[in-house]
Image: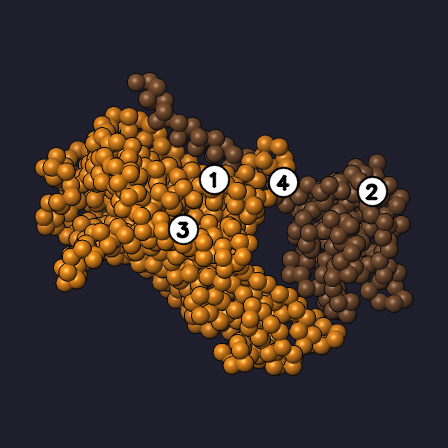
Chain colours: A orange, B brown
Amino acid sequence: MIDEIGHFALILALGVAALQSVVPLIGAARNDAALTGWARPAALTQFLFVAISFFALMHAYAVSDFSLANVAANSSSLKPMLYKLTGVWSNHEGSMLLWVFILALFGAAVALFGRNLPPGLRARVLAVQGMIGVGFLVFILFTSNPFLRLFPAPADGAGLNPLLQDRGLAFHPPFLYLGYVGFSISFCFAIAALIEGRVDPAWARWVRPWTLAAWCALTTGIAMGSWWSYYTLGWGGWWFWDPVENASFMPWLVGTALLHSAIVVEKRDALKTWTILLAILTFSLSLVGTFLVRSGILTSVHAFASDPRRGVFILVLLALYTGGALLLFAWRAPQMRGGGLFAPISREGGLLLNNLLLTTAAATVFLGTLYPLFLDVVAHRRVSVGPPFYDRTFVPIMVPLLIAMAVGPMLPWKRGDFGAALGRLKLAFALTAAAALVTLVATSAKSVGAACGLALAAWLLAATATELAERVRFLSEPWRAVLRRAWRLPRAAWGMTLAHAGMAVVIAGITGSTAWTQKKTIAARPGHSYDIAGYTLAFDRIGEVRGPDFTETRADLRLMRDGSQLAVLHPYKRFYRVEDGAATGVAIRTNLFADVYAVLDIPPPAHGASAPAKGDGSYILRLYYNPLVPWIWLGAACMALGGLISLTDRRHRVGAPVRRVRPVAPPVQAAAE
Amino acid sequence: MTARRLAYLLPTGLFLLLLAGFLLGLGRNREVLPSPLIDKPAPNFALPPLHDGQSGFSSADLKGHASVVNTFASWCAPCREENPALMALARAKRVPVYGIDYKDNPKTAAAWLAELGNPYTRIGADDGRVGIEWGVYGVPETFVTDPEGRIRYKHVGVLTEADVERTILPLVTRLEQ
């Protein structure tokens, strides 16, 4: 019964979305308040229906209703409740429902919190949002309906892929989708602006918080995915340049560019059409990502069960939304007048450089991801593009970006003095040189690459700190005044400082893990000890543990340093009976500077035989020492937190009335606001 | 002015190229991995049987008639799925179906075949080495060889009854003419 309600609610949501995408547009074109007024209630109603549908599916998973084909294929009655619930988005149909749920959530949020938007703009934004909803609701209902019944209902389900039975799956996809789908709001604002033919600083101020929110979620989602692959796959790595990782990374890169170019529109009324284009591209890349993952067009560890019909359907949606948006852009954007002029060396110049480098980086990743596909189409050859490609192309683009990222915030708007900015960074130069020197000396000049990486991180961190110190007049005024200044500093400034510092920490983490990871593969026997990177691991015993639907072989490894015990590590391998699959449990001990990482490799049990050990009683144990790897996620968390803090800035708070004219804005703009 | 307009059309143009690429990419069947072994003689091999006393499977069995060679394993879930198609192929009695039991436990494999039905004329137990020579990426994979013992077709993944009807049997007929 509840399943039928969910199914029916989804159909009603489609009807409402159809109204939402047409009526407010007509209203806005005719300046008819009665019709534009449809936008808000329609968005809220659409959200209500999609939410009913989503929670109906979740209910079906919670009570293990195997008469739904989707539940039967992806859950089993033996699952713990958490994995029953996260099973909802572990599969294509359910995750598409999550996709439209989040889309409708953002639509409802604009309807609720967008009270300060001019009614015409809000109506158009919500109408475009409705159009996206229509496309994806039709997609779900006709090709990927999770509410289809199975008759007769099986006694139990087929279970959930063991790799996905992890707490990380509860959060990674929802955050990723909040990011992907959140960029749809920036897209809708861009389309609405193109329809109205007007982009001004006010528009940028409205679109920024939505972009920022999506960016924070995407940053978190990507970092969680990377962390998840680090501790569940057991390969010791945290990023594999897999097509699906790239699919989430490309919108992040362009979204980051968008975040920065929107600042220029807001403060200086410049880079307008460029910002519009970025908003279109960011969401389009999210759509491309959806297409790549769902169509099975690329081979990837993430691929959902592929179905060419679905691929064609998403391709049609991509053609309609992105194609339509780009045509509208080609038609309307040339008529937009550029605003403030600026010299190449200026804050705007710095942000423009940031944009060029970020979009070039995204283009590189795009090329690497799609090259195998296009080569196959054009030359019928199969190749795969791996890390060496990205090391040689992506990294060289990031280096100037990071160098410039340190200087940019030091430059004033309109026209800056490069020499003066560098002069203020003397201390940062010294710290950078020191970081490089110390690294070289400590590694006896072996790790030149690592020295460069750490120098870059030090440069960015020191310059970011310098910029903050100057703002609060650190050391040049009494500490009371400094604290007062720090307190009064706009939250957006704190957000930037934190995000840039987080980036520096990420760079240090990447450098450490690339340069100094140690790895050992051992045929280990219980009772023996093994050394890695100054640590000793005593392999005490190995035994079997039975879980509700799995058998776990787990080892006890005492981690010791200089004779004292630090921890007991329990790497394990689980074999799931229902799914006939395995999951690896990596044991990680971190001190926030480095991880000791242990993996137990056991082949699947030959049915009946129960000795996982090799003939001589040994087990394959892989040990890793991963220096600075925790910093990658600490840094990413710092970046997301920076975004969040910036989001609480009064200027970005959606719905908050503008209290005062911002002193930073040049007089012309201030008058216009 | 027109140059400016054209510049704004550039993203649309690039996007159309991308769409075309995607569309062509979707049309390409990814199941067909171009095997470098197509039209080459099948490797020389002699595989032992699952049980002592039975006959194994070797390259000599491929001579004189078209053959279907299927790699399978009892630990492979898709193999279970394609078993009915292979059974149908065996019932058609048009072509011998040979099995390479890939990296498997002979006892479990025998129990598995007893449960599902055994479509194979002959089965060879392979510890993985012969599979590599056939260019096997993973099980199941199905090959069709011609009367001279050359590999003429490779199917990756689950074989359906439709594949048998539309591809395998017509190909066998053509190869034997």
Q: Which residue is mark 4?
A: A382
Task: Give the numbered dot on residue A153.
Answer: none
**Which residue is at 66% across, 46% downward?**
B162
Give A193 or B74, whichever is nearer the viewer. A193
Looking at the rendered structure, the secondary structure element under dot 4 is loop
In the rendered image, residue A176, in percent from the top left (x then y), is placed at 39, 54
User: Which image quadrant is residue A539 in?
Assistant: bottom right
Residues flagged by tags 1 and 4 on a common chain: yes
Q: Of circles 1 and 3, which is in front?
A: 3
Q: Residues within 10 Å of mark 3 (few under 14, many from 20)?
A: some
Q: Residues within 10 Å of mark 1 (few under 14, many from 20)?
A: some
Of callouts 3 and 4, which one flags the residue occurring earlier in the amino acid sequence?
4
**Which residue is at 39% across, 61% downward?**
A634
Looking at the rendered structure, the secondary structure element under dot 2 is loop
Residues flagged by tags 2 and 1 on a common chain: no
Three-letter residue code for mark 4: Arg
Q: Which residue is mark 1?
A: A364
In the rendered image, residue A486, in percent from the top left (x then y), is placed at 19, 58
Three-letter residue code for mark 1: Thr
Q: Residues within 10 Å of mark 2 (few under 14, many from 20)?
A: some
User: Which image quadrant is residue A337 in?
Assistant: top left
In the rendered image, residue A141, in percent from the top left (x then y), is placed at 42, 50
| Left or right of residue B176, residue B89 in this image | left
Task: Give the numbered dot on residue B41.
Answer: 2
Q: Which residue is mark 3?
A: A433
Q: Of circles 3 and 4, which is in front?
A: 3
Distance Cα–Cα, label 2 vs label 4: 22 Å
Three-letter residue code for mark 2: Pro
